[in-house]
Image (tube, grey):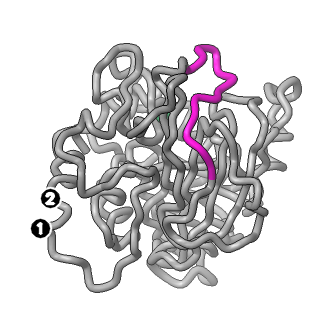
Amino acid sequence: MSLRSSLALLSLACLTALPLTATDIAWPTSLDRASIRSPEDYLQPTVSGRLESATFGMVREEGKRFHEGVDIRPSACNGDGEPLDLALAAMDGQVAYLNPNVNGPYGKYVVLFHAGAELPVYTLYAHLAKIEPSLKVGASVPRGRAIGLMGHTSAGASPITKDRSHLHFEIGLILSTGFNLWYAGQAENKLSPNLHGLYNGQNLIGMDPLPVLGRPKVDILAVLRSQPTALTVAMRTGKTPDFVKRHPALVRGEASHAAGWYVEFSWQGMPIRWTVLDAASNQLPAARWRLQEIDQSQRTRLIQRKMLGVDGRSPGELLTQNVEILLSTAR
Ligand SMILES: [Zn+2]
């Protein structure tokens, strides 16, 4: 989604008809959503100063670097220039993960799980100055409850300066509950232990948060389904990937009859539609999986995102990784 259309959603929030089933959404900072008049009111761009760099997509380093969430600026700071804004739970949910240490690019961060949404999703709140001390993993958190204080913590290669304090907010899905085993099995990970378990960024796949945050009520499943298919993969496995079990709303066909799966991915690597392939299907690949079709209109972005190789035809590093993670519980 372009910056313009994302932002249009925000300004149109009050004019749009409410969906029949919907999840109540709170703006995830102290900023009053109704006060937003322009993108400058809530976006915190990178040092480039380009507002688009604060939004979701291939928006950094001339389209070469992906940003998996939205960066929301503080609405108020103290005399030292530190943000006074709280990070707030965007929906009713429970605490999935707390990282109180500054040991990665996200700094101190919180992950919430929203089992009551139309599709169970996770939200992530990063670069916090501090996490609300009363939060415990597994505890319920109502929408709008403070979960921390906005900050600029990050152990990334380029630190976030105080004047660029922001909440990095993500919404997405977990690829596999088998992630930890998959990670440990990768030779290149021997020297970098997985500090965040299932909540490692490689296992969390995000979608554009603005169509969700822009309205007070949203059908999360409808937003997820509105992402177009960018490429498709056929997998061969008689075992059901845990992703399928956790997201039955994304599945067509009877999982117990599956000899494999036809999976539609969005451009950023989210497996958004799964169709059962039975044993007689001519789409079943001879190997474990095969890249099937590519939407050529999305080719450039798919190459930049490494969903495709530089030739624009072969599977890219990210596609290979995501498929292997998805299949990690279906061996
Ligand atoms: Zn960010």
What stretch of residues is rendered in magenta?
Answer: 148-160
**Element marked by disc 2:** loop
Q: Is the magenta stretch mostly helix, strand or loop?
A: loop
Whether the residue under disc 1 has CB within 8 Å of ligand 1: no
Depth check: give the residue in front, 187 or 164: 164
Tell me the quarter of the picture where residue 175 sits: bottom right
Q: Quadrant of the C terminus?
A: bottom right
For the point 37% across and 36% down, the residue is 57
Residue type at the position of mark 1: Leu
For the point 78% across and 63% down, the residue is 136
Residue tagged by mark 2? 12
Query: Can residue 307 be seen from the camera position used here?
Result: no
- Residue 330: where, in percent of width, then height? 73, 63
Residue 183 lies left or right of residue 76; in this view the side is right
- Asked if residue 107 is positioned above or below residue 223 in the image, the reply reads above
Q: Does the magenta portion include 316?
A: no
- Asked if residue 34 is positioned above or below residue 181 in the image, the reply reads below
Tell me the quarter of the picture where residue 60 sits: top left
Residue type at the position of mark 2: Leu
Within 10 Å of disc 2 (Cα), the crowding (few <14, some 14-19, many 20+) is few
Inter-mark Cα distance, 2 to 1: 5 Å
